[in-house]
C-alpha cells in the first residue's frame, strides 16, 4: 500500500508539472506543447490526482469535453487496476 501511495504521489507531482508547462506553452502559442496522449498516459499510471488538481488550478483542459471524457475513463481504469493489484474486497 505504501508503494502505491508513493508511486501515486511521484506521478502526480510530475503530471501536475506537465500540465503547468502545457498551460504556459498554450498561453504563449508555443509549439512546445505536452501531448494530450502524454498527459492521459501519465494520469493512467497514477498521476491523475495531480492532473486533476492542475486542471482546476490552471483552468487547463477543463472545457475540452473530449479530453475530460478520456481523462475520467483513464481514472476509472486506474482505480480498477489498483483495486485488483491490492486485492481489495468488493
Image (tube, grey):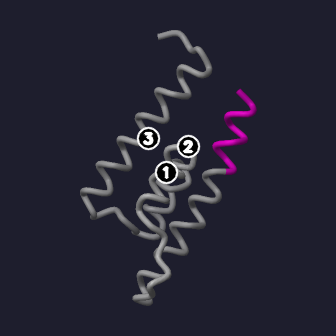
Highlighted magenta segment, given as a residue range:
1-10
Q: Are marks 2 and 1 in contact (CB under 8 Å)?
A: yes
Residue depicted at 69% across the width and 42% down the height: 7
Residue depicted at 67% across the width and 47% down the height: 9
**Which mark is first along the chain, 3 or 2?**
2
Q: Is residue 2 magenta?
A: yes
Q: Are marks 2 and 3 in contact (CB under 8 Å)?
A: no
Q: In terms of secondary structure, what is the magenta stretch mainly?
A: helix
Report the residue marked by disc 1.
41
Report the residue marked by disc 3.
75
Judge left or right: residue 86 versus residue 34: right
Dot 1 falls on a residue whose secondary structure is helix
Instruction: State how many labels appear.
Output: 3
Q: Is residue 7 magenta?
A: yes
Judge left or right: residue 86 versus residue 80: right
Judge left or right: residue 48 versus residue 29: right
Q: Position of residue 82 (x, y in %)?
A: 56, 28
> In the picture shown, does residue 6 fall above or below 27?
above
Q: Are marks 3 and 1 in contact (CB under 8 Å)?
A: no
Question: Which numbered marker is on residue 12?
Answer: none
Residue, far top: 89
Judge left or right: residue 75 versus residue 42: left
Label 3, label 1: how many angstroms apart (C-alpha)?
Answer: 10 Å
Label 2, label 3: how many angstroms apart (C-alpha)?
Answer: 9 Å
Q: Position of residue 53 (x, y in %)?
A: 50, 57
Report the residue marked by disc 2.
45
Local crowd at mark 2 within 10 Å, few (<14), some, or many (≥20)? some
Q: Position of residue 44 (x, y in %)?
A: 49, 44
Dot 3 falls on a residue whose secondary structure is helix
In the picture, the quarter occupied by the N terminus is top right
Amino acid at each position: 500500500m505504501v508503494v502505491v501511495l508513493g508511486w501515486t504521489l511521484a506521478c502526480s507531482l510530475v503530471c501536475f508539472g506537465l500540465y503547468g508547462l502545457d498551460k504556459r506553452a498554450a498561453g504563449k502559442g508555443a509549439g512546445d506543447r505536452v501531448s494530450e496522449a502524454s498527459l492521459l498516459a501519465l494520469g493512467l499510471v497514477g498521476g491523475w490526482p495531480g492532473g486533476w488538481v492542475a486542471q482546476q488550478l490552471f483552468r487547463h483542459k477543463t472545457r475540452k469535453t473530449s479530453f475530460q471524457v478520456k481523462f475520467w475513463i483513464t481514472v476509472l481504469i486506474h482505480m480498477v487496476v489498483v483495486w485488483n493489484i491490492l486485492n481489495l474486497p468488493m
